[in-house]
Amino acid sequence: MGRYTWDFSVITANWDPLMAGLSVTLQLTAICAVIGLVGGFVVCQMVMSRIAPLRWVAVAFIELFRCTPALVQIIWIFYCVPFFFGVFYDPFYMAILALGMNITAFNAEAYRAAIQSIPSSHYDACTALGMSPLKKTIYVILPQAVLMAIPVLLTNTIGLLQQTSLVAIVAIADLMYEGKTLATQTYRPIEIYTTVAFIYFALSVPLSQVVGLCERRLRSRLA
Amino acid sequence: MNITAALGFLWDYRLALFIGLGNTLYFTAVGLAFGLALGFLVSVVRQVGHPVLKVIATVYVEIFRGTPVLIQLFWFFFCLPALLGMELGNVFSTVLTLSLYMGAISSESFRAALKAIGSEQRDACVALGLPARVSVPYVILPQTVMRAVPTLLSNCVTLFKESALVSAVGMADLMYQGQMIADATARPIEILTATALIYFVIAFSVTRTVTFYERSYLSRMRL
Amino acid sequence: MSSSFLNVQGLRKSFGGHLVVLDDINFQMEAGERVVVIGPSGSGKSTLLRCVMGLEKIDHGRIELEGVRYIEANPKSHKDNFVDIPVRNKVGMVFQHYTLFPHLTVLGNLILAPMRARGESRSSATQRAMQLLGRLGLESKAGAFPGMLSGGQKQRVAIARALLLDPKIMLFDEVTSALDPELVTEVEGLMLELAEQKMSMMIVTHDMWFAKRIATRVIFSADGRIIEDAPPSTMFTNPREPRTADFLKKVLHVETIS
Ligand SMILES: Nc1ncnc2c1ncn2[C@@H]1O[C@H](COP(=O)(O)OP(=O)(O)OP(=O)(O)O)[C@@H](O)[C@H]1O
Ligand SMILES: [Mg+2]
């Protein structure tokens, strides 16, 4: 080990930009999480729709976003959307577009898996009880699907929090970007990157505890 | 846009893209090899190891799952060499990060698979008088691996996609090459789309293989 | 040392130190006997069989087979029990949920232990396995994976897997409980065949009619103790203990069976 002297005063001195970055990170995460929760369900319904073209579009969308790196998606959208549409949107909105579509694709899969895990006997029971298909979806399938999907949806949201750090590469001033800038400005990368990593970690851990709790609850409820 | 012209343009840069892809595959492959071995070891330690080792293994897994890969890369590129007071080499830092990340995510897959083997299977081994030297390699290990293969393959796809981040620290992988050409030629659409497609084709084939494997083998054995 | 074939002495078993499931069980059986254990759910029937098989760590007592002690509690230290593995390997057990190895074929399941644990050659183990499968009418299933078999077939393969190791005694824990009614007979038929060949057996079942057919002795257990131990003729028609009579009345909905 080299004798490195830690000096965390650099953190307190630059507290404000770090917090500003954190705020951008949290905004991005929150907005895209909501987009993903709603969009994922819509895309999932499209995948299971009876109309073939809708199905194809939805499946292509999911596979495209699940099988390419999020970074490629972000860069592609940043470079190519202005080219195609001839307009420059605020980078923040472009980032929301990219990350929002990414989590939508992953959440759609989570919903689909949850719906498929509902035993067919439940559908039969609904029919036997004389429920209409719409009522069946609203009262029986939807609540169960959401319940079953919660752990994976939460896990995806933790993933989203971490993916937001990619926007630093396209110079959006999130936590990662502020960290990077400060690290070069202050020549104190160790303290800064360690602190930034710790902040992400501290945000993820409670969420993953909730995931564990949900899984145990679900298991005991469905047992 | 003229397709022939686009293809001709891409053809001119085939070598650069090819080198990038080679590097991407190389980083991914080395990360996989070390990561899978580490992941299996960690999962076994977390199941049967000494309490202190268990805590260390758990903290390791949680840190690498709970922070963005980008910050992990930055940390191993800029912080670790300074802390150790020596050069590590860029390739070493890259491969180290990817291996540690893969080790963390794959250890969870191994752990879930180990857990999923019911105590009944172990009881049957005792009732048949199988000593550990027989039951571990012939009963426990094959079932663990067969169960873990689908999630491990998805982990591989994840690692392959995450490897695109090494472009952010200047490693000449596929993403980096694509971006470089896009910047140099001011023709991002063709080159970034081609880059995305290359990632897609590889990731998508592996994903399909997983589905095929699950359908044909796992369902037949009702594991 | 006792001259009994199977001898359970002062067996005590608790879970977590306070839930006492078996409380000072003393029990002997002779070779060729077929002892059926009956009793209310949770009375410790499975636990008794699992202790005899050596699947549970016991708190107190010892178990002997053919006069040789093979399991003994270690009351002073809370370390593992003493287990004589070669003797324990003379005990075979079949479980309620088949517990076949899903990644191996039927034949693979049968020959794994003879080959890998007993050092028998592949050809000899395969030959014996195929002979046994032939007797059970399961020859055509040798290459099938367990997931492709019916419940009754799975359970008969599980019995064959245990038999191939030439056990001195077989333990059956509710082996037909998970089966569809029409598949029960094929498994019970196989057990009756084993009875004819004078196989020593301990059987846990909830089917009193089958118990009456196969048993040479019936044990009624409740609250971790053996309440009554009698031949089936007495047990089912004229039980001595009021608790036995109560239990039989509940499960049979009639006074006695004849
Ligand atoms: N691994 C265990 N840990 C804790 N308690 C256990 C365990 N196994 C069994 N028990 C408890 O021991 C008691 C006896 O269980 P056992 O399975 O032997 O009963 P049983 O007579 O076989 O019942 P059944 O007819 O339902 O199969 C029950 O109260 C059960 O809850
Ligand atoms: Mg039982």
Image (tube, coloured by chain):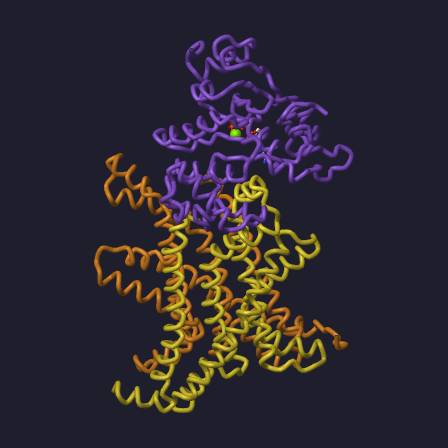
Residue at (71% x, 55% y) in the render: B52
Question: How many callouts does the rendering have?
Answer: 0
Residue C10 quadrant = top right
Left or right of C247 in this view: A189: right
Horizontal relation, residue B67 to residue A86: left or right: right
Position of B109 relative to A88 (above/below): above
Residue A172 coordinates in the image, percent (x, y): 48, 76
Q: Which chain is yellow?
A: B
Nearer to me, C119 or A105: C119
Q: Quadrant of ligand 1?
A: top right
Residue A21 visible in this rendered orientation of the protein: no
User: Eyeballing the image, is B57 above or below C3?
Assistant: below
Q: Is residue A95 left or right of residue C229?
A: left
In front: C179, or C246?
C179
Chain coloured purple in the rendered structure: C
* Image spot of residue C41 (x, y percent): 52, 25
Query: Is residue B28 shown above or below C124?
Result: below
Can residue B223 be spotted in the picture?
yes
What hue does chain A carry in this figure? orange
Q: Quadrant of the N terminus of chain B?
A: bottom left
Q: Position of residue C235 (x, y in %)?
A: 51, 13
Query: Measured from the top left, where is residue C51 in percent x and y?
Result: 62, 32
Residue at x 65% of width, y 25% of height: C7
In terms of depth relative to the viewer, which is nearer, C29 or B136? C29
* Left or right of residue B137: residue B184: left
